[in-house]
Amino acid sequence: MSDTDSLSEALKAISVSTELIEDELKPHLDTVLSSLLEKTAVRESCIEAGLVKVLLPHLNSNNQEMLLNTGRAIGRICFDNSYQQDMLVQSGVIPRLVSIMKEYSDNDPLVNVCLLALCNLADMDSAREALAELDVADVLTFQLKRAPDAERRHVILEILGALGESDTLKLQFAESGVPEALSEMIQCLQGGSDPHDLCSIKIASNLIVSLLLGDESMQKCFGEGSGLVYQDVLSWLQSSNTQLQLSGALAIANFARNDSNCVKMLDLGVVPHILTLLEQHVDEGDVSVQHAGLSALRNLAIPATNKVRMLEDGVTERIKTLLRSDMPPVQFKLLGTLRMMVDGQDEAALVLGRDAVLLARVMEWCEAKDHAGVRGEASRLLAALIRHSRSPEVVLAVTKADGVRHLTSMATSEHVIMQNEALVALAIASAIDLESMKDPLWEAKLLPMLKKMLEDPEGAVEVKFSALGLICSLADSSVMKEELNSVNMKESLTKLTNHSSSKLASQASSLVAVLSDTS
């Protein structure tokens, strides 16, 4: 009998298998399995014969060998076939797979078949919904702890990763101790050099970071700073494994998503660990680690009380070592972190705003040709130093460093928030030290730009309002008042006196009066 004939015979026999007892069914299953292993075209014949539907009831068998062969056959037929996979899920295969793993948890070949099947189905929403009804987390963590090799570990980790994208399952995992089990696995594998183990560490630590994206699961793992996962994450920051350092910094940034966690972490002394980590990577270091470390610091600096304490602890001094970085992602994050540190902190803004080395580097970054993000963040930091320090020394330092040109350019940004920040900084600087500001403002062609801004029919009201604030500061000087009249600013202001925003119209009217007053 040819291979094709024996396969046809086997398919026919299995199709009427309700009349066959399991012992009679087994040789036919073996024939199908060996054919499936050898030829891909066989899959089509199996699908056409409706084999999956016929095999499904045999997953309720009490015979472990029968379960194994049935599971293998179904797995091979359905691999990479979304229609068949969907049919499997609709037919209720998920609860059956989980219960087989519970019932025969120490039968490794059978558990393996069930895990591979789950791995193939775990990306489907219908499968995730079915699994959310079952205590799959306990089954998977039990198998993770007894996994005999890296291959089994990786299949389980892949399933956990796919399922963890569902918020419902994220929380279930946190409540069932999945992050702790992953953390424990990492602890056991640390220190070795086996590439498979290092790969497991990478997947598991990434998985913990993604589980922390859910607010409730993150809070559960934090446990007010005494959670096992949080404690382990701290140790990752001090690890020699770059992957763990990266995951540790990302996890801290995720824990630092609310003020009370940020304050608690500062109390528990997380900041020195992050700074030490950043310093390790300053020269020739890992860009991702630096980026993640700065993200964590930035988040920790959001509560005002933390800013004060971090400044007292010399954080800005220590992160300034990163100014020498030539990697745009690090530059971008560093600028954002420094901006967060000076937000509402006049003392910090004064210290940084007087720092000639810092200002020189920020000026370079204001001209970063290939990185608009770095350019934008550098200008925003410049504006923040003036806005939060309101100091004559800072204004003088910024004008000397040629910063006015960059602030004027930032005022024409496509982002309203950046336009506003620039205009407010220029208004404050002009009110504080117009003498130093006059020439740079003239060179930057500020007045024609302001005129255009006021006349722009598409312009945002808040931007026009900030522009009026700047004109108000300039009009305090008789020389600047003449300049304003020479570009006929009064005409642009008069047009605004009928604006639908009464606040804007009223401010424009006041300024028309100021510019008309020649006394």
Image (cartoon, rainbow, N blue to C red):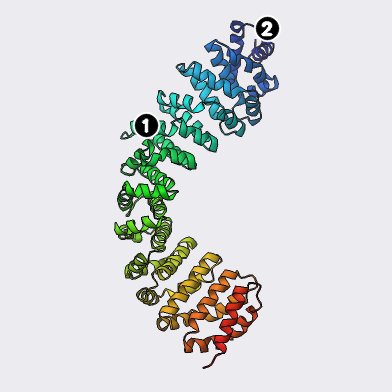
On screen, residue 413 above or below 303? below
Looking at the picture, how far across and down is residue 462, in whole percent?
57, 69
Q: Is residue 4 left or right of residue 154?
A: right
Q: In the image, what residue type sits under mark 2?
A: Glu
Q: In the image, what residue type sits under mark 1?
A: Glu
Is residue 122 visible in the rendered structure shown here? yes
The CA distance from mark 1 to mark 2 is 50 Å
Q: Is residue 323 left or right of residue 14?
A: left
**The quarter of the displayed image where residue 451 is located:** bottom right
Q: Nearer the viewer, residue 89 or 504?
A: 504
Q: Nearer the viewer, residue 29 or 437?
A: 437
Circle 2 residue: 19
Q: Is residue 467 left or right of residue 257?
A: right
Q: Nearer the viewer, residue 440 or 53?
A: 440
Q: Mark 1: few, some, or many residues within 10 Å (few <14, many ≥20)?
A: some
Looking at the picture, how far across and down is residue 408, in whole percent?
49, 74
Label 1 residue SS = helix
Circle 1 residue: 184
On screen, residue 36 above or below 494? above
